[in-house]
Amino acid sequence: MYNFFDLISDIHLDFWVKPDSNLRKMEKKIDLFVDSLIPFSPSNVLVIAGDLGHFNNQNVFMLKSFMRFYESIIVVRGNHDLYLVSGKQNKKYRSLSENRWIEMKAFANDIPNVFVLEGDTITLDGITFGGTGMWYDFSYGIIECGKTREELYQLWSKEMRDRKFIKKQPDFTKEELRFDRIIDESDVIVTHVGGDWSQLLQNSGYFKKGEDLTPSFYFFDGSNWFDRLSGKIWCFGHVHDHYDYTRNGCRFINNAKGYPRDNPGSKIKTVMI
């Protein structure tokens, strides 16, 4: 007997529906946007592998809109879910990104059957999902390109918006511990940042072939866990390319929506397990 779930990530809602003080008008636009993402025959469970959008009130409307089609929704945190993109947000959340995420989790937990995973597991429709946001560790540039951590840090500081809009970066050690404790129990692992870059430059429209160091900020080195992944599915986002491949007996899937320029016609993907 097969089970199914639906998958999307990197929705970046405010790039598709502009925030509006007229909440009823904005809610209708969000409903239309959500309608455009739904597959022909949706599963019972929707997995969102991070990056809802920059504004919590919009994100809440979107989750409630998805609940018109799904019995349950699973969410993990993405890097953009920590962004403080305006002076107003900095003031509201006291220049601490974690405060925005705490608020978003509280809003989500108030919606019945929406589950935010941070080193937790939950079993729905016979599938055990384990999730946490994870973070990148610069390892691509160190391992593949021979760069030092300091060189990569300088590039990150100069080129990445995370440096500007996230006030106090997540603790990678804490994320590793959360990740480690969900693996063995999970049929489906959900993170925002992926742990395998082996398919990185195959048909990629997101990264340049050659001496492109920016993948250092889009993956972490998950090789230490590869021998524990056989038979599992690992869903991830952060990268706006689409992936569906098997390595070490594990199926890696990315179904990012991305910005309007990335995958304008893409929809939620149904995954069979």
Image: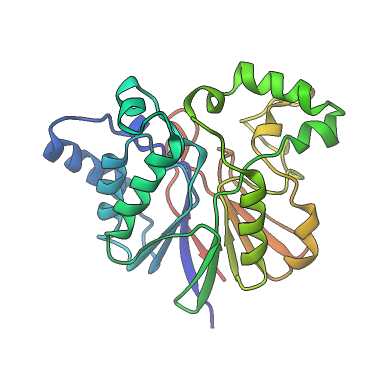
| Left or right placement of residue 259 versus residue 37 in this view | right
Q: State the image coordinates of residue 124 (x, y, percent, origin top left).
A: 44, 74
Q: Is residue 175 above or below residue 94?
A: below
Specify how the rendered protein is coloured: rainbow
Task: Please identify the residue farthest to the right as the structure is shown.
Answer: 146
Q: State the image coordinates of residue 155 (x, y, percent, origin top left).
A: 69, 19
Task: Please identify the residue farthest to the front as the structure is shown.
Answer: 94
Residue 202 lies in what quarter of the image?
top right
Residue 147 lies in what quarter of the image?
top right
Q: In which quadrant is the C terminus drawn?
A: bottom right
User: Residue at the location (61% across, 51% down)?
Assistant: 175
Task: Please identify the residue farthest to the bottom as the structure is shown.
Answer: 1
Q: Nearer the viewer, residue 94 or 24?
A: 94
Q: Is residue 71 above or below residue 66?
A: below
User: Residue at the location (56% across, 35% down)?
Assistant: 169
Is any part of residue 212 visible from this angle? no
Q: Nearer the viewer, residue 252 or 229?
A: 229
The count of marks equals 0
Is any part of residue 53 visible from this angle? yes
| Left or right placement of residue 10 versus residue 221 in this view | left
Q: State the image coordinates of residue 46 (x, y, percent, origin top left).
A: 41, 60
User: Residue at the location (75% across, 26% down)?
Assistant: 209
Q: State the image coordinates of residue 130 (x, y, percent, origin top left).
A: 55, 65
User: Residue at the location (33% across, 67% down)?
Assistant: 113
Q: Nearer the viewer, residue 244 or 102?
A: 102
Q: In which quadrant is the N terminus drawn?
A: bottom right
Q: Is residue 184 above or below residue 74?
A: below
